[in-house]
Amino acid sequence: MTLILFIAILITIPYVCGCAFKCFLRDMGIDVIHTYTVGFVFMWLLFSVIQVPLVLKDAPITVIAIIYPVLMVLFIVLAVAKSGIKRFRHELIRHLGFEKQGILIYAMMAAIFIAIIAQIYVAAGIQENGVYNNEYTIARAVQICSDGTLGRRVNAFTGADISGISFDTVMSSQAVFIAMISYIFRQPPLVASNLYIPVIIIPMIYMSYYMVSMVLFHNKNNRYIFLIVIAMLSLYSNYSLHPAESIWNLLFINCWNPNVIACHILIPLGTYYALTAINSEFRWDRAAVQLRDEKSDKLYRSVIKNRRIFLCKRTYLVMTAAALCFTTAYGIIMGTILYACIFMYYYVSNYGGVDINIKRYAAVIMPAVIYLVLLIITSAVSHTAGSISGFWQDYTTCYKEIFSNDFKNNMYLLIFISAVMYQYLKKESSGKAACVYIPMLVFGIGVINPLIYMLFRLFAPSYCKVIFWILPINAIIAYTVVDMINAVCNTDTNRNINIAGVCLITVISIISFMPRYGYNFAWEGAAAPDKISDETRQICDIIDNDGQDKNVIALNELCSQIRLCDTGIKLYYYTDNQYACNDDKDMYAYLNQDEPYLQGIVQNAKREGYNYIIFRKGILDPNWSSVQYHIWPAGSTENYDVYSIGYF
Amino acid sequence: MITEFVAAFRTAFYQYFSSIYFYPFVVVVCMMLTLRTGSGLQKRILVYIPVCIFAITLCNPIYWKLAGVTADYTYSRSYWLIPFFLVIACSLASYISGLNIRKVTVLLMIFTVACVVWGGNVRNLYVNKNAHTAENIYKLPQDVVDIADAVIGNSDGNIRMLAPNEINMYIRQYDARIGLVYHAWNEEVTFEEKSFVLNGESRLATFKGLTEEMNRDRADIYYMVAVQPYADWNYIVLKNSQYEAEEITDSGLSIIYKNGNYTVFVKSNSILESGL
């Protein structure tokens, strides 16, 4: 009963939506199948778009199950309001009339219906041998139904919590769609995907190929023969020959796979729209050229009509390309290649004849371009910070740290802003461009731009916190001070007093506001001109006197200095785990945590042939170290103990 | 690079056609027929544009490199852009439509019968080497459904399962309440990978280690038990041939479900003392 209700909805709603859409577009010439496919693509696109924010916000599944039908109804109501009830009803029934056909047509139509029903039956009833026929999409749909929310950050394969949700997961709407169907019709997600989805997909596939056949054949008989041959070929191919990577194989085994919608429905439909758009553009251009030579109503009407057809087809094509973006990443790549090939082929093959205006088709490529740009950005963001939210957190934290480290305890930023404001407000300032506009542009485009931050995170993370160095803060302050002094000096009245006042304010500023010694920075006096601490020298001396090869595992804070003091020392890793021995990332964590993992450190050190380990003082009892871990104290400084590893 | 590209081209070809080499031959013949007898539009859609796509994508080493960046399968699946069936169907339809109605009917009948007898035979469909009748409405192996039902029935809500690949890759498609320690297709584990010493031998609690152990002919039960504190599993599924009864007794596991192929164990409270 539920399935019958579902089929009834499936038959009516896309058609009504298609009628509503063509009312908005005022494209009244298209037939039933065309209207139905337009409605289907529109519904798919609408669903795919609205699921994106809901997934990102982890909305309950009930929200999309309510919002989606409500939006559909609203769209239809708007279309009815726009065109009027009578007109809309007329459009609904206009092409539904029964037209008597020959017996052969009836036979072929029956054959196609039987093929569709048989394929649905097969798609729902068989499974492949030895191939894992269910994968991420279904696992995610089941997860959504189980959680009752759309975007919970969970690895669908394992159920483990994860920090973020990937771009293609958000953009691929199939799992959410299956979950919604499952929720609305109260069926397990696997039943929805293996039975309900084929009921949607397989008839739609034949409709898409029927649309393509409309371009290929003018004769109706040929179109039906074409569809029958396709059905037979697919059946024959899949169950007898079974080409493993064939898209037709995917259709039968995993009908719910988003690649099936992309490659069997949207790409053929897009091909049809692209070809018909090009065709109508040619007709439009030809009529326009003729109209210049010969003024006639017929030609004028032809120009108007073909322009209207072109615009409609292009709209359908853009809609299909956009729907591809929300279906599968593979689909959008393949679709874009196909459309680009079609347009380029026509452009090249008609070069010198009737021109194809390639700019008119730019809109078709735009969804793919936007998709790819977003994909690149989010991939880079995910690569650098794990997820989008993680990236924003990093970004804001970085700028908070810049502020608190460099500007919070002084008036430096305030003085800079005052200088810029002074230059901006000053009349006839020659330094406006250099001190105001260019720095503001640099600040906006370079310093606080998340993209620039992302690039730095990706390629040179250590520079993220010094991006603001690009701003010529000192130069602008200095220029403004000189400018102020000049302004004051050029004032006729009380000239000396003004100069004295400016100097006094400058001196007070320097004394009061600039960072004071020992207040903002943990500076200490260097013991020697080479700025290496005495303790580091002592450690190097201990190692040197002990006499073994100088293979050393040192704490992070010592790494940066110890090789400056003695270049003969070989370190297990450098600071922040860079250049680790044999890529062994564990040692850094083992040694630098509050309670070092002594057994792991000694095991790894011995395995790699390292002779010395430097611990913080008191971590290990020197009297027991040899008994517990077979390491012996080699010497000690105020803060560190140096141990020698025994290989006995 | 060229050698690699040629190898990739060959692999993609084999993957797509799966040793059915007469398909490309038929397509080439149909393309030539279309070139000879088809309309201008048919030639463009079914010959020129597919050939362009073939040249730009599958015969292009730069495309091969770029496609490799997106996914492993992108290059080989570029064959999906070549409308093989459309070319064949269009040629056949054009040819058939030139005949009279009686001949069309006879030809279609022969064609349909040939397809059904040779390839799409309904009985053959369900027992052939490539596919079989779905065991249940979920199109999942029945063992998976039974195991999942048993575990859900036994648990208090928190399930972390360790299972062989043929079970773990399906089970969460049946019920998402079952958490997995690892999944065959997803090379991640849900715990921090560690090395530990078992019976004086250094072992690894990693995806690779778990996969190897769980999918061996004879599983090392003591290894599974030793991994438990890291992996934190509370249910384990083993093939009946993978273990001995005394190993289970020693390890402190309890059986909650057993069928002809698999046994499901639950972690008992004494497990922490047993193997560690």
Image (spheres, grey):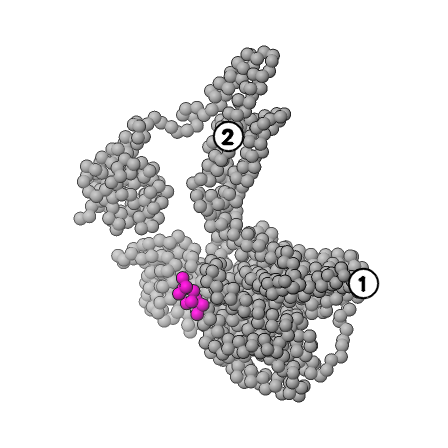
Residue at point 57% right, 68% down? Answer: B49
Q: Amino acid at mark 2?
A: Ile
Residue identifier under label 1: A296
CA distance for labels 2 and 1: 70 Å
Assign a secondary structure to mark 2.
helix
Residue at point 53% right, 76% down? Answer: B28
Q: Amino acid at mark 1?
A: Ser
Q: Which mark is residue A473?
A: 2
* Mark 1 neighbour density, 10 Å: few (under 14) some (14–19) many (20 or more): few
Q: Nearer the viewer, residue B126 or A289?
A: A289
Residue at point 68% right, 82% down? Answer: A107
Q: Nearer the viewer, residue B72 or A346?
A: A346
Q: Chain of mark 1?
A: A
Residue A172 in picture, x, y percent from top left = 56, 59
> On the same chain: label 2 and label 1?
yes
Assign a secondary structure to mark 1.
loop
Front of the two marks 2 and 1: 1
Q: Is residue B8 magenta?
A: yes
Residue A402 in picture, x, y percent from top left = 48, 35
Q: Is residue A372 above or below residue A569?
A: below
Residue A319 in picture, x, y percent from top left = 65, 59
Q: In this picture, which residue range is highlighted in magenta?
A: B1-10
